[in-house]
Image (cartoon, rainbow, N blue to C red):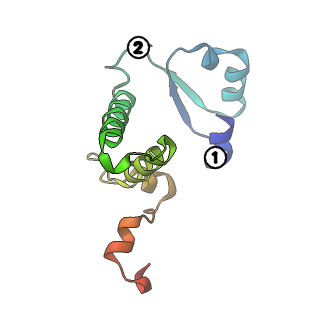
Amino acid sequence: LRDCFARFGLRYTVVSDNATVFKSENMQKFFTDNRIKHITIASYSPQNNGQAENSVKTVKVRLKAALADPSNVGVDLSTILARFLITYRDTPHCVTKKSPAEMVFGRQIKTKFDLLIHSDSQI
């Protein structure tokens, strides 16, 4: 979490399961000192953790498809994962109508697709 907070700033709220790491005295002190509200959900409860469960399902399905794609033969897993992540992070969510990148950075990210649809002067 330290790397995440250093990169993106402190959160107002952290939602987690009841994992020991989140319930530790050090973590609770960190939450208190930084005025972060900690909300816990039941462990192993997909109905309470639906958004995360859907994200995990999406990653599994897409990676499985990418690994089965003949054009990816010989391509290392980290490259396949990076390709998936930039696409996932640039795809608008059906509810928010904004991509995860836009929600985090306040702007759309540049992808290879932009190189295909825009001239050099537009990029």
Measured along the vertical axis of the image, is residue 95 above or below residue 25? below
Residue 58: mark in rendering? none
How many residues crowd around disc 1 within 10 Å: few (fewer than 14), some, or many (20 or more)?
Answer: few
Residue type indicated by callout 1 = Gly
Question: Which residue position holds label 2?
Answer: 44
Asked whether 50 or 34 is in front, the reply is 50
Give the mark, 1 or 2, whose residue is nearer the N terminus. 1
Q: Residue at x 42, y 62 (%)?
A: 108
The relative height of residue 53 versus residue 87 in the rendered view (above or below) is above
Q: Secondary structure at mark 1?
A: loop
Give the residue at x 37% y 83%.
119
Number of labelled discs?
Answer: 2
Q: Amino acid at mark 2?
A: Tyr
Q: Point out residue 70 in the picture as x, y percentages from the top left corner.
A: 30, 46
Task: Say which residue label 1 marks.
Answer: 9
Identify the image quadrant of the C terminus: bottom left
- Residue 102 or residue 85, whichever sits in front: 85
